[in-house]
Image (cartoon, coloured by chain):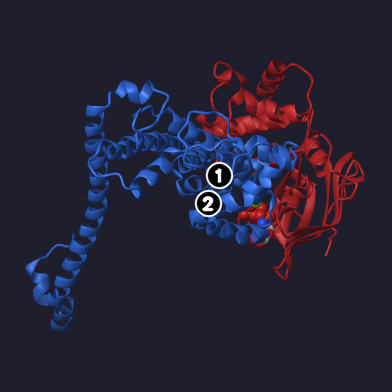
Amino acid sequence: MATRSAERVITGDEAVRAALRRKAGRNIPELIIRWILLACSLISILTTVGIVGVLVFESAAFFSEVPLGDFLLDTQWTPLFADKRFGIWPLVVGTLMTSTIAIAVALPLGLLSAIYLSEYASPRLRSTIKPILEVLAGIPTVVYGFFALLFVTPLLERVIPNLATFNAISPGIVMGIMILPMVASLSEDALHAVPVGLRYGAFALGGTKFEVSTRIVVPAALSGIAASFILAISRAVGETMIVAIAAGQRPVLTFDPREPIQTMTAYIVQVSLGDVPAGSLAYRTIFAVAMLLFLMTLVLNIASYFIVRRFREVYE
Amino acid sequence: MTSQNIVQFDGPTILKAENVAVYYGDKQVLRDVMLSVPTHKITALIGPSGSGKSTLLRCFNRMNDLIRGARVEGQVTYHDQDLYDPEVDPVEVRRRIGMVFQKPNPFPKSIYENITWGARINGYRGTMDELVERSLRRAALWDEVKDRLHENALSLSGGQQQRLCIARAIAIEPEVILMDEPASALDPIATLKIEELMHELKENYTILIVTHNMQQAARVSDYTAMMMLTEDRNSATVIEFGKTQAIFTHPRDRRTEDYITGRIG
Ligand SMILES: Nc1ncnc2c1ncn2[C@@H]1O[C@H](COP(=O)(O)OP(=O)(O)OP(=O)(O)O)[C@@H](O)[C@H]1O
Ligand SMILES: [Mg+2]
């Protein structure tokens, strides 16, 4: 802080003083901008709070009519039929099945691509491919959905006997392809952040490129890689369009990925687009399902937060 | 450019550089380097910053291969075998010619695993526990870490980390250890420990060490090579080589004398 001694003001050059004086006209726009920015951040916070509030409120209403025990223990999900059953498992299993397939595709391939890009590719190739990965991540998921239904499923029908037109495998695989660029890109960031000195240390001990990559660099970047994996999993669990288009709308408890299934997200879409009257019990099911989905992804995101925090400490 | 000041060493030599030139891209940084590294001795590489000491060091274990755009010309031999022969596997070279870096770079693994990593990838068949104890003892670190072998190596102090890196390097039984300013990040006590350690290691290993510290060079080394930019200032070379004592008491080259006495660099 400068001291404002009276002497200084008096001795100051008149022109300098005029130039340095606060200009009244500047303050008003500054204030307006500040309020606009504040309003913007408030809007996003309030929307989130609002969404969670609606979820909690509507699911509370749902659970006042349907016991939590039925929701968690029943194995049938038929809220839209005359004989209403509210067992969530068909939707959860459907979600887990497509997600598992997606993860089985995305994690290994994503990690291998990341290792290739970070450790083997030339800087030029790397700087070409990285932006392409980011573009791939921006393709609308509805495109992937039709890709699954119209291209991958017919292809799989030739190799997998008894594959239904709507099934878990095809959207699972395509979802994996959709998440792959994200896994590759984030894992590559984690690998790239490993100090080059560690690699030199390992090479100087007679490590081959493969040994250095897989036994030093990957373990050192493990928390970052794990964080990208968790993000990928929560993407897969929350993905809607691909499964809504290609997995079917049959909420039946099955562990056979060749059969049509329904995921939690696809169910929400189906009911939201249908003609279920607002305020009815059937209408409220979507909030209960959404609440569970929200909790699942929240847990995953919190886990990734803690993992990433650990990641920061790893080299020092 | 190779001057008469380079005394060709006539005893047993393990590494030899002959007419070595190194380029990074189009830029030549070393030219006409002649250097013989005596077996089972400590040789110091001294010279001002940018005179290519690290670059020359890296020529001896083919670490320059890892730097994109780096190119080595001339001959570098190890037991008279050309290290840059296309038949030579750089991985095997680095097994026999170890390196310790300026900044301690232990792996983010346990102390124990830091030692066993190199042995494991090199197919070591003995007992790992013994190897760990033997290497840590030789690096004068055993007593300080014997109760915490499974703790993360990054929990060690900088000086301990550097001794761990030395232990890790000797665990794979190289013949030569290249050290690039191994003590520059350490306090005087840790530095002293490393210097004592080098004296011990001399029995079994050949050591080539880069240092900026003239006293350290005088204290630890048997031979000294002085590196310097050439007149055109574009590239550097070894301008003088000899017994450390001779170099420090009667340098033949004016530039060596100026450097040692602190007038340049
Ligand atoms: N990877 C690199 N790419 C391009 N130029 C490099 C690279 N490494 C070193 N150089 C250049 O080569 C010259 C010699 O560098 P080097 O690191 O070998 O010097 P040094 O004697 O070890 O210096 P210092 O004492 O500061 O460590 C310098 O001009 C440096 O800028
Ligand atoms: Mg250097």
Is residue B258 in sight in this rendering? no
Mark 2: secondary structure: helix
Toward the viewer: A234 or A127? Answer: A234
Q: Residue type at mark 1? A: Pro
- The answer for which chain carries disc 2 is A
In the shown orientation, is residue B18 left or right of residue B69?
right
Image: A54 above or below A29: above
- Residue B184, position as x, y percentages in the image: 58, 43
Q: Colour of chain A?
A: blue
Q: Which residue is mark 2?
A: A145
Subunit that carries the residue with mark 1: A
Q: Is residue B124 visible?
A: yes
Q: Disc 1 vs disc 2: Cβ atoms closer than 8 Å?
A: yes
Residue A63 appears at what percent x and percent y?
Answer: 25, 29
Chain B: colour as depicted:
red
User: What residue sits right under mark 1 in the picture?
Assistant: A171
